[in-house]
Image: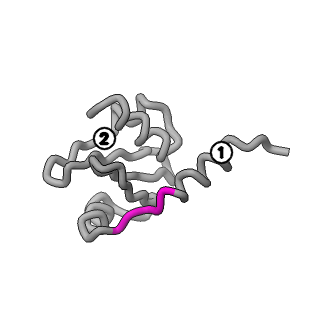
Amino acid sequence: MSRDQIRTLAEYLNVDDQVVVEHHRVLVEDDAVYAVNPVRGGSAVIVAADGSALWGNSSLTFAQLLAAFRSGRRTPPEQFTEARRERSSPVA
């Protein structure tokens, strides 16, 4: 897994890089990487080699998320951008 992939996964999960390093799985068959934030209510994301991604909440199992990813479902990139913007906005 490359440094860029680690950063992307960490950004999408809103966690430190170390969380991704400790809680990821390379999906060789899918040319992708899966990572999870292992806290209660945490989320998971699969990022393909082409940069497309599928985010899932904690109610989805790994198998469910992977099946959706393999069927072609993806999270629109702008949703990650909006979430990033919301996290970086100062609280009034």
Q: Is mark 1 on a helix, strand or loop?
A: helix
Q: Is residue 76 left or right of residue 30?
A: right
When the figure is inspected, residue 82 is found, relative to residue 68, above or below; the finding is above
Residue ranking furthest to the left: 29
When the figure is inspected, residue 49 is found, relative to residue 60, above or below; the finding is above
- Residue range corresponding to the magenta coloring: 73-77
Query: What is the quadrant of the N terminus in the image?
Result: top left
Q: Residue at x 49, y 41 (%)?
A: 11
Instruction: Give whichever of discs 2 and 1 has the lower sequence position.
Output: 2
- Percent across and percent down for residue 92 are 85, 45
Q: Which of 80 and 27 is in front in this view?
A: 80
- Percent across and percent down for residue 50 are 30, 50
Q: Please name the residue that numbered disc 1 is placed on.
A: 87
Q: How far apart are marks 2 and 1 (CA)?
A: 23 Å
Tell us which disc is closer to us: 2 or 1.
1
* Occupied quadrant, residue 6: top left
What type is the residue that disc 1 sits on? Answer: Arg
